[in-house]
Amino acid sequence: MPTTVLYIAGTGRSGSTVLANLLGEVDGFFAAGEVRFLWQRGLVENRLCGCGAPVSECAVWREVFEVAARRGAPVDAAAMVRRLRDTGRIRHLPAMVAGRLIPRLDPTRAQSAATERAALEALYPAIAAVTDGWLPPVFGRTNEPLVVPTIDLTVHFRSALPHAGIPLDGFVLAVFRTSVAAEGFLDEDGEVWAPDGTLLAQSRQLAAILPLSR
């Protein structure tokens, strides 16, 4: 399932950070903070993450950058800071909007920005992978905001762990399917596979389907 990114836009002191932090407390959300400042404040200045550790020492962000780099988009903090300085200010907004009709007017679409675009495109999937922010399959079938709390979850391990041949920072394939969603409930079947084709684990979950407004 594609990574779903909720972008909150607002001017300074508008409450957007408070809103993001509140959403970060909701199961299934990960508040990445003001990503525009991630490179300047996080990597160059090495400020504190919300966990209390400097960004360079934060286990989550360190792995996010490693995953993004493995996707072919290593992060050059200084280059990203320069690019955002030249394109990420409010005065550039008219050119970006005009770029919808005439792409050459949008400075973020220039060929010179290709490296930084690739880094951003790799960053969000890396955040989702590291924070396990994937949405339940049913979210792809509805246009209404929902919450899907777990009622019952069973996990069966089908192979001895740790599995030989998978490094600590390696990837596995996780497949989740919902075959029944009715009367306010759904089931979700999951499988986790090793790169060599070994089935590592299976899961079955029963969850309720509730409107977010409740």
Image (cartoon, grey):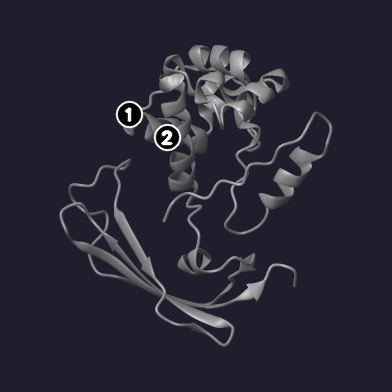
Residue type of the residue flagged with mark 1: Gly
Asked whether, in this view, residue 138 is left or right of residue 115, the answer is right
User: Could you tell me residue 5's position as x and y percent?
Assistant: 56, 46
Residue 87, relative to residue 5: is it above or below? above
Label for residue 57?
Answer: none
Mark 1, Cα crowd under 10 Å, few <14 / some 14-19 / many 20+, is few
State the SS at label 1. Answer: loop
Tell me where residue 36 appears, x and y as whole percent.
62, 27
Report if residue 95 is visible in the image.
yes
Quadrant position of residue 85: top right
Residue 184 rendering spot, x and y as whole percentages: 59, 83
Which quarter of the picture shows residue 102?
A: top right
Q: Which residue is mark 2?
A: 122
Residue 111 as seen in the image, left or right of residue 157:
right
How many numbered circles does the render carry? 2
Q: Is residue 161 above or below residue 94?
A: below
Secondary structure beneath label 2: helix
At x 47%, y 49%, the residue is 3
Quadrant of the rendering where the N terminus is positioned: bottom left
CB within 8 Å, label 1 to label 2? yes
* Residue 45 visible to an observer of this rendering: no
Provide the residue designation for mark 1: 72
Residue shown at 16% from the left, 59% from the top: 197
